[in-house]
Image (cartoon, rainbow, N blue to C red):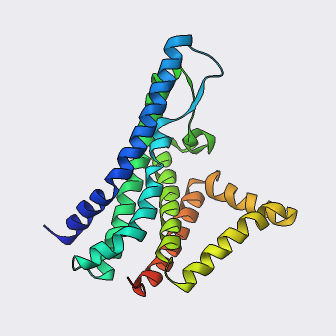
Amino acid sequence: MNKTNVLWRASFLQLRVYMWCVFGIVTASFVSNFIVYMSTGYQEDNNQVSIGNMLTIFLIFVAIVLPTAFFKRIINLGATRKQYYVGLITIYTMWSAAFALFNVLWLELEKGFIREYTNIFNLLEIFHWDQFGVIGMFLYQFGTYMLLASLLNLLFSGLRHPVGWILWVLLIAAIPIGTSIPSLRVHVADGFLALLFNDSLFAGLGLTLGLSVLFLFGGWLLTSRRTF
């Protein structure tokens, strides 16, 4: 068995508790909404978030748990930092692609069946990614999920490094400053519009993947100097 398969299996063992927790919460939400429907019937104000979108929350745990708890375990198994990080990028890529594909398929199921019984909010429609067709929806999601995973990977890979602490301080400071100052608020809004609501698939995908590469490179610089 090659080391990529070993990394994948080890990561799955590391993440399975979180996977079952997310799945359990989403299942409980679905069951409760189903009970409400069976009790009261279809109601206009009975709204819920898409199950596909809710399950994608697991990707956040992937990008947090692996940089924090997975590194020491894999290095102790004999992997180099490079092997660990290449494996990490592979895992992020596979999960991002899997959730992007799942959400595309789930949206079609919602349109064809589930929405006859309840109103559903789906991020693919909220961000207007559905305007790009099936392939476009997949690609825009994939870029966005990789951006999210790479940013979290950068932040949590640097928890033991001064540069990582600076990044956390900058991020924490940027949120209230960027939203409270009117002149900056406009630029923040424009940035999110360009990333998530871009009317050009190629521009949106280019921005998300470009930033992903930048964040992954920063994560590698921190990982290459990381101590136990």
x, y percentage for residue 66? 39, 66
Q: Given the current orientation, which residue lies at the most extreme right position?
A: 182
In the image, 144 versus 51, the foreground residue is 51
Q: Position of residue 105 (x, y in %)?
A: 41, 37
For the N terminus, the quadrant is: bottom left
Residue displayed at 68% across by 57% down: 192
Relative image position of residue 148 (x, y in whole percent): 52, 60
Residue at 50% over, 79% down: 218
State whether residue 120 is above or below residue 172.
Answer: above
Single out the residue that lies furthest toward the bottom.
225
Left or right of 135? Residue 119 is: right
Q: In which quadrant of the rendered image does the C terminus lie? A: bottom left
Query: Which residue, as the protein is rendered here, is positioned at the far left?
Result: 1
Is residue 75 in view? yes
Q: Residue at x 37, y 49 (%)?
A: 19
Q: Toward the viewer: 157 or 137?
A: 157
Q: Residue at x 34, y 65 (%)?
A: 90
Give the number of marks.
0
The image position of residue 84, as x and y in percent, is: 31, 75
Which of these two is toward me, 194 or 172?
172
Splitting the image into 4 quarters, where does residue 208 fall?
bottom right
Residue 104 seen in render: no
Looking at the picture, does residue 16 appear above or below residue 46? below
Residue 157 vs residue 178: left or right?
left
